[in-house]
Image (tube, rainbow, N blue to C red):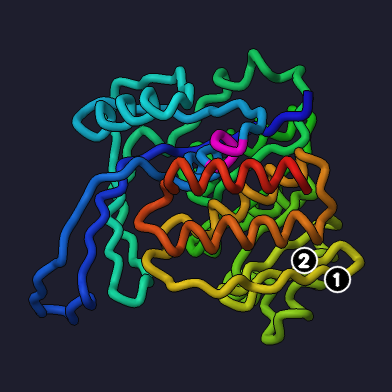
Amino acid sequence: MAAALIIGSTVCDVMIYLDRLPNREGDAHIDHQQWSVGGCAFNVVNILHFLSQPYQFISPIGSGIYGDFIRRELKQLGIPSSISLDGANGCCYCFVESDGERTFLSDHGVEYSFQAEWLQEIAREKFDYIYLCGLEVEESTGLELVQSVSRIEGKVIFAPGPRGRLIPKDRLEAIYDLHPILHVNEVEALEFSGCKEIHQAVEGLYQRTGQLVIVTLGEKGAIAYDGNWYKAAGIPTKVIDTVGAGDSHVGAFIAARLEGLDIAKALSFANKVSSRIVASKGVHLTKEQQEALRTELKQK
């Protein structure tokens, strides 16, 4: 059975909604706050889970109030994670302004760590996709993670994220040597390529990896390139909260490809899922929204 291997963090997102972040030494009242289970890898798995796609999830959970919260939430969602660590689980403070844009302040705990032994039991299994996030690669155990993934059969899909430029060069080159699908936004594509024009940037990244490059363009949709160009239009929506939009796009793209959709249709479906996410608070859609997307995917 086709499957995806998702490796990375599950964290407690402390969602803080306010009109606008104050300047340094400023002061502001927030509208409200809430806790939500999140993290890049979780956000990907969350999409695969409600779209009924097969996956294995490697995500360590620590101790403390955030770890306890995550265990309860994952159990309620029916998403399995069997790795428990003694150290404290961190959290991410997500400041969401009135236009939906977000700012993150992360307190990293053991949820971003990695141990090679976690993959030993599945080392001989074959996966269609293996998801990696830049945050875990940036950590001190990041090289061990990349080396462990290199020994598993499957197409790597790598989302470096906004901190991707902080990944040590040798580690980044090791990932490129795996010929991963790159999933980036426009700013990240320009930064990673060193180009000033997006199409040149995408072609430059493709020349290095030899594999599909996906670039999300916000309201303008998404483009991709693997020697051929693909474009999927954006879906107009009222933006409430952009937290998890990129992660959910990755998850939906993987789900669509596992379901057998071609690249262009997979991009369009991923755009639709991402549009639903940004129109909601956090990354959790209603049961009705999930069922509608699941039905649509099965009918494509």
Q: Quadrant of the N terminus?
A: top right
Q: Is residue 126 above or below residue 26?
A: above
Q: Where does label 2 land, which residue?
A: 224
Residue at 10% across, 74% down: 28
Q: Which percent across, then down, holds residue 207?
A: 85, 65
Q: Nearer the viewer, residue 73 or 21?
A: 73
- Spot occupied by residue 5 in the image (x, y as percentages of width and height): 65, 32
Give the residue at mark 1: 229
Say if 36 sits above or below 233 in the image. above
User: For the stretch drawn in magenta, what is the main secondary structure?
Assistant: helix
Q: Residue at x 39, y 35 (%)?
A: 111
Secondary structure beneath label 2: strand
Q: How far apart are labels 1 and 2 at the CA level? A: 6 Å
Does residue 54 lie above or below 286 as drawn? above
Q: Residues within 10 Å of mark 2 (few under 14, many from 20)?
A: many
Q: Which residues are magenta?
A: 47-51
Location of residue 86 by image quarter: top left
Q: Amino acid at mark 2?
A: Ala
102 within the magenta span: no
